Amino acid sequence: MAGFRIRQAAAEDARILADMLVEAANWNALRARPRVAVLEDPKVLRYVAGWKRPGDFGCVAEDTHGAPVGACWARLFPADEPGSGFVAVGVPELTLGVNTQWRAQGVGRALLQELGRLAAGSGANRLSLSVERANFAQRLYVSEGYITVESRATADTMVRAVR
Ligand SMILES: CC(C)(COP(=O)(O)OP(=O)(O)OC[C@H]1O[C@@H](n2cnc3c(N)ncnc32)[C@H](O)[C@@H]1OP(=O)(O)O)[C@@H](O)C(=O)NCCC(=O)NCCS
C-alpha cells in the first residue's frame, strides 16, 4: 500500500477541500471544467462554502511529506436548500475526492471508512451521497454498505446507516 495517513479535517483545510471538490466534480475527464468554473457553480460550491461550519466534519489524506492527496467530508443541508444527495434534515451528505495520481491505491476507501467513524462520533445515524451511475465510485459505495434510495436521470442518491 502507498504511504499515506489520514487526519481529521480542520477549519484551515478549506482550500484542500475545495481542491478535492474540484476532483469530485471533474470525475469524468471528458467533461472536466477549469477549477474556477467548478467553484463558481453554486451547486458545487455549496459543499465547501463557509467550511468549517457547525455540523461539518471530515478527514484529509496526506502523503508521507504531509501533502494532501485526498479528502472526504460531510455537511448538513436544510430542506429548503438541499444538496444533490439530500434525504432528510440531520443526515449529513458526503463528498469524496482523491488526487489523480493517488487513485486506485486505497486512499478513497480509507477516507470513506474514516468518515463513517467520524459520523458515528458526530451523532449522525445516517450518511448520504449523490453519485453518477456512470462513475465507478458507485461500486465503491456499494461495497462500503451504501444503498440506493432514489434514482434520478443519471445519478443516484445513496444512504448508509452509521453504526
Ligand atoms: C472515486 C475515488 C474517490 C476513489 O478513490 P480511490 O482512492 O481511487 O479508490 P480506492 O483505491 O480506495 O479503490 C476503491 C475501489 O475502487 C476500485 N477502483 C479504483 N479505481 C478504479 C477505476 N478507475 N475503475 C474501476 N474501479 C476502480 C478499486 O479496485 C477498489 O476496489 P477494490 O478494493 O475491490 O479493489 C477517486 O477515484 C476519485 O477521486 N475519483 C474522482 C472523483 C470522484 O469520482 N469522486 C466521487 C464522486 S461521487
Image: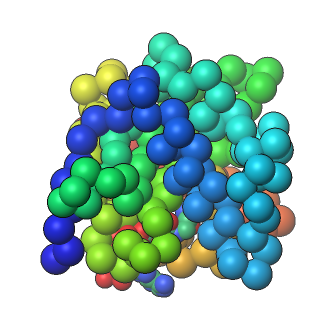
Does 24 sit left or right of 1 as displayed?
A: right
Residue 28 in view here: yes
Which residue, as the protein is rendered here, is positioned at the far top?
54
On screen, 113 above or below 83?
Answer: below
Query: Extreme front residue here?
Result: 65
Which residue: 63% across, 55% down?
Answer: 22
For the point 49% across and 73% down, the residue is 100
Foreground pick, 7 / 81: 7
**Residue 67 x, y percent position in the rendering:** 32, 54
Q: In the drawing, does residue 78 fall left or right of residue 7?
A: right
Q: Residue at x 43, y 34 (%)?
A: 13
Quadrant holding the N terminus: bottom left
Q: Is residue 151 visible?
A: no
How far across and how far down the image is residue 94, in percent?
51, 44
Q: Is residue 69 above or below residue 102?
A: above
Quadrant of the frame with the C terminus = top left
User: Which of the four quarters of the rendered structure image does ligand 1 lie in?
Assistant: bottom left
Provide residue 40's location: percent of width, then percent of height: 81, 42
| Nearer to me, 69 or 48 | 69
Above-or-below relation of 77 to 159 = above
Q: How is the image coloured?
A: rainbow
Quadrant in the picture for residue 134: bottom right
Q: How many marks?
A: 0
Residue 59 in the image, given as x and y percentages of width and height: 34, 42
Question: Which is more toward the observer, 106 or 3?
Answer: 3
